[in-house]
């Protein structure tokens, strides 16, 4: 056996093996690895986009919730303001009604007072006439002394 010939066959076999491996084994493995690397990169990018979309969704949800709370507070504020206005209106209406009732009652009191004064004047006039009758022991003519009674009633 010749060492050089064996070494030459081994070199040729090794070169053939490397060429065969590169052509039929290594290229599909590298292609599969590259394809897998691309899929992994795409998956990571999609996951990152998904996380960004989720964060944006959360931010939008927080914003919508904040706007809803603000609108609710505005509505509550308007309702409280309207309630206060209704209370003030009711209070003013009640005050006006009370003043109207008080005015009507005062007018009625004045009317009754005037009636009572007129009644008292008439009674005082009758008492004056009765007193004069008692004093004079005679009857006094009502027509003749009507002016005196009216003056007396006006003074009272």
Image: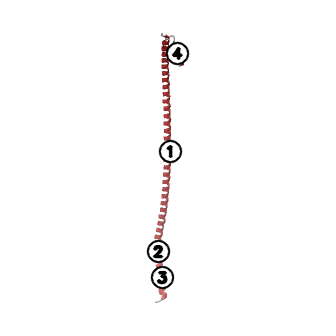
46 over 61 or under it: above or below: below
Please give the label number shown on residue 77: 1
Q: Is mark 1 on a helix, strand or loop?
A: helix
Q: In this view of the protein, which residue sits in the foreground, 84 or 42?
A: 84
Q: Earlier in the sequence, mark 1 or mark 2?
A: 2
Please give the label number shown on residue 26: 2
Residue that badge 3 annotates:
12
Q: What element carries label 4?
A: helix
Q: Which of marks 2 and 3 is nearer the N terminus?
A: 3
Q: Is mark 3 on a helix, strand or loop?
A: helix
Residue that badge 4 annotates:
150
Q: Distance between the residues labelled 2 and 3?
A: 19 Å
Q: Are marks 2 and 3 in contact (CB under 8 Å)?
A: no
Q: In this view of the protein, which residue sits in the foreground, 41 or 102?
A: 102
Q: Residues within 10 Å of mark 2 (few under 14, many from 20)?
A: some
x, y percentage for residue 69?
49, 49
Residue in the image at 54% along x and 18% along y? 155
Q: Distance between the residues labelled 4 and 2?
A: 144 Å
Q: How crowded is mark 3: few (under 14 residues within 10 Å), some or many (20 or more)?
A: few
Q: Which of marks 4 and 2 is nearer the N terminus?
A: 2
37 over 55 or under it: above or below: below
Residue in the image at 47% along x and 62% along y? 47
């Amino acid at each position: 056996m010749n060492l050089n010939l064996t070494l030459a066959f081994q070199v040729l076999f090794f070169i053939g093996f490397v060429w065969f491996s590169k052509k039929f084994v290594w290229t599909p493995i590298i292609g599969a690895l590259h394809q897998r690397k691309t899929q992994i990169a795409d998956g990571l990018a999609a996951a990152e986009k998904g996380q960004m979309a989720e964060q944006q969704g959360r931010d939008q949800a927080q914003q919508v919730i904040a706007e809803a709370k603000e609108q609710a507070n505005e509505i509550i504020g308007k309702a409280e303001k309207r309630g206060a206005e209704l209370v003030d209106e009711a209070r003013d209406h009640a005050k006006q009604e009370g003043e109207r009732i008080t005015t009507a009652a005062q007018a009625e009191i004045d009317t009754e007072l005037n009636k009572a004064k007129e009644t008292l004047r008439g009674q005082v006039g009758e008492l004056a006439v009765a007193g004069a009758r008692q004093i004079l022991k005679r009857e006094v003519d009502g027509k003749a002394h009507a002016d005196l009674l009216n003056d007396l009633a006006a003074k009272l």
